[in-house]
Image (spheres, rainbow, N blue to C red):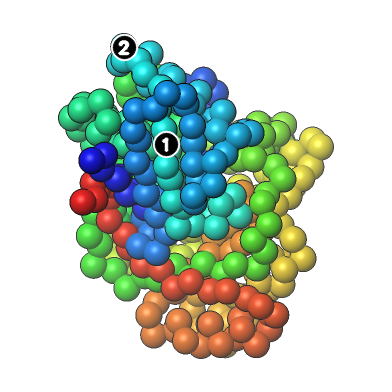
């Protein structure tokens, strides 16, 4: 019986948005994330007569299947193993809606690959492998808060756990304003972002913001964690808006949500936002304010879906 590997999605509070090397997926900056309990990918790999990728019970052909197999072929080459594989994944994440589904997907895939071939890797080794599939996946090996140190080559670029079981009153409310697939992938987006005149300043601020975030987490300081995460996300989206040609992942509903968060804050309901490569917004809040924030969003938006997430665990093997 083949076993299933589960990896949870993570959301970056200090973002990765720029590559130093696209083949090795080496980033231009270090990043820090929160692994979520509510979103994850389950993946199982078994021997097969032909390479096949099934997602949520549906056989995939196009781009998603070729991305999965170019990653697996890379790993097969690295470990000098062969064989056709059947990959079965269940994504408990709205795919490609800016909820970073690739983080859990490629972490689970790297884990399932190692399980299938019987390789017993350390977390750091697994993080490096996951990074080759998707940068953010390097962080999904860990629960709680994880840091991906940018490094300068394959060996030195991996994620590690900052705190796998944080004792912090921090909720992440994932607000689904729009669950359409994004039309600009993160790979394309970060490439285009490098044409912004603010791209170098964005890279230059990374170390300072990362250090400030680590201190805020250690000090259990929700206000600083939230305001830094919001600032960092705004910087990332500012480089998109100032790229040449400029682009944005924001939709009108995204702007409305940003204004609503400012409004809630001015009324003493402390909350902050972060946004990834899609139109949806994630709200950082403390438990006591979840109800008020949710009610306000439900009254201002039609058909809004809000998922109240907290810290999730690292990668694991089920059954
Ligand atoms: O690793 P990718 O291709 O999923 O890119 C992730 C990009 C962001 O989600 C926007 C930021 C991040 O650090 O996760």
Q: Is residue 153 above or below residue 37?
A: above
Mark 2 vs mark 1, foreground winner is 1
Going from N to C along the chain, the mark reached first, 2 or 1, is 2
Residue 162 lies, in percent from the top left, at 27, 49
The numbered disc on residue 264 is none
Frontmost residue, 24 versus 52: 52
Q: Is residue 310 above or below residue 194?
A: below
Residue 13 visible somewhere in the drawing: no
Disc 1 designates what residue? 87
For the N terminus, give its image quadrant.
top left
Residue furthest to the front: 49
Residue 263 lies, in percent from the top left, at 63, 81
Residue furthest to the right: 245
Residue 215 lies, in percent from the top left, at 32, 55
Residue 112 lies, in percent from the top left, at 32, 36
Q: Quadrant of residue 148?
A: top left
Q: Are marks 2 and 1 in contact (CB under 8 Å)?
A: no
Neighbourhood count class around disc 1 (C-alpha, 10 Å): few under 14, some 14–19, many 20 upward = many
- Confirm if mark 1 falls within 8 A of ligand 1: no
Residue under the image location 57 percent in, 39 percent down: 60
Q: Is residue 288 left or right of residue 4?
A: right
Disc 2 designates what residue? 80
| Disc 2 from disc 1: Cα separation | 19 Å
Q: Quadrant of residue 191?
A: top right
Q: Is residue 263 left or right of residue 30?
A: right
């Amino acid at each position: 019986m083949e076993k299933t590997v589960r990896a949870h999605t993570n959301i970056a509070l200090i973002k990765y948005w720029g590559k130093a090397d696209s083949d090795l997926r080496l980033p231009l900056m270090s990043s820090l994330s929160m692994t979520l309990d509510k979103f994850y990918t389950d993946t199982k790999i078994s021997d097969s007569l032909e390479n096949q990728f099934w997602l949520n019970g549906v056989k995939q052909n196009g781009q998603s299947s070729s991305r999965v197999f170019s990653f697996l072929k890379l790993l097969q080459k690295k470990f000098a193993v062969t064989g056709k594989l059947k990959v079965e994944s269940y994504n408990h994440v709205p795919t490609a809606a800016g909820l970073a589904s690739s983080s859990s997907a490629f972490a689970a895939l790297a884990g399932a690959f190692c399980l299938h071939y019987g390789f017993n890797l350390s977390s750091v080794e697994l993080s490096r492998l996951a990074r080759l599939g998707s940068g953010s996946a390097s962080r999904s090996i860990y629960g709680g808060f994880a840091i991906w140190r940018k490094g300068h080559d394959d060996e030195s670029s991996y994620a590690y756990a900052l705190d796998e079981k944080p004792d912090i009153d921090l909720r992440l409310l994932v607000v689904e304003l729009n669950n359409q697939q994004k039309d600009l992938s993160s790979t394309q987006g970060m490439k285009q972002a490098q044409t912004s005149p603010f791209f170098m300043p964005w890279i230059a601020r990374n170390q300072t913001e990362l250090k400030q975030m680590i201190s805020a987490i250690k000090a259990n300081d929700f206000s600083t964690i939230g305001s830094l995460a919001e600032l960092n996300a705004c910087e990332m989206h500012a480089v998109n808006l100032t790229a040449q040609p400029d682009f944005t992942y924001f939709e009108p509903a995204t702007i409305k949500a940003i204004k609503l968060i400012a409004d809630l804050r001015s009324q003493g309901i402390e909350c902050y936002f972060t946004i990834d490569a899609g139109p949806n917004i994630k709200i950082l809040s403390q438990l006591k304010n979840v109800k008020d924030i949710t009610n306000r969003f439900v009254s201002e938006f039609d058909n809004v879906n809000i998922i109240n997430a907290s810290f999730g665990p690292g990668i694991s093997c089920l059954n």
